[in-house]
Image (cartoon, rainbow, N blue to C red):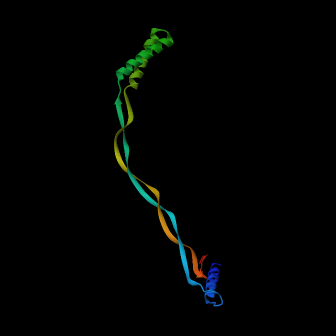
Amino acid sequence: MKNSIKNILISTALVVSSTHAMAGTPEKVKVFDHTKTIVTQVPINQQTCSEVKVPIYSSVTTQGDAGGGALLGMILGGILGKGVTGDDGGAAAGAVIGGIVGANEAQTSTNQQVVGYEYETRCSMQTGYREETIEAYSHSTIRFHLDNKRYVLKFKK
């Protein structure tokens, strides 16, 4: 279909230019090809790396205050023993048991603590885009003058 239109236009221009029976002949017959600019976004995968500060953990054992824990346990145990039994013997037994428990709980504890930092390189893939520009065929025109009139016909190859 496209070639037939082109052939018809060219044939018409040739017939018009070769016929002497017409009042005039076409002058300066020219064919022009036209292009258009196409811009596309082309994806690009890039590896990006960065330095990351990472904590260093260590188990830290702390020595508790066994005497303070025993004293607090004795006081609370005595109060609870007296309250439960209503007598001084219950208070004494509660104080002894509370002192033992308080001293045991207050002895040592182990916790995780940050003791420093180190730097690690961590990388990941990132998608970026770049523009790509191309010139592509759009259409063609045939131009000529006939009887002091300018004609422009548009067609596709």
Q: In x, y percent, where is residue 16?
A: 63, 86
Give the quarter of the figure containing the N terminus.
Answer: bottom right
Q: Using the image as rendered, state which of residue 154 and residue 85 is in the foreground.
A: 154
Answer left or right for 41 relative to 116. Answer: right
Q: How many tags in the picture?
A: 0
Q: In x, y percent, where is residue 75?
A: 41, 15
Residue at position x 57%, y 76% from top? 140
152 vs 118: above or below: below
Q: In x, y percent, where is residue 18?
A: 61, 90
89 vs 97: above or below: above
Answer left or right for 90 relative to 53. Answer: right
Where on the picture, by quarter, is residue 57?
top left
Give the quarter of the figure containing the C terminus.
Answer: bottom right
2 vs 16: above or below: above
Q: Using the image as rendered, state which of residue 142 and residue 53 is in the foreground.
A: 142
Q: Using the image as rendered, state which of residue 113 and residue 37 is in the foreground.
A: 37
Answer left or right for 153 relative to 77. Answer: right
Q: Using the image as rendered, state which of residue 5 and residue 104 is in the foreground.
A: 5
Residue at position x 40%, y 18% from top? 72
Q: In x, y percent, where is residue 42?
A: 49, 63
Residue at position x 66%, y 90% from top? 21
Where on the picture, by quarter, is residue 47?
bottom left
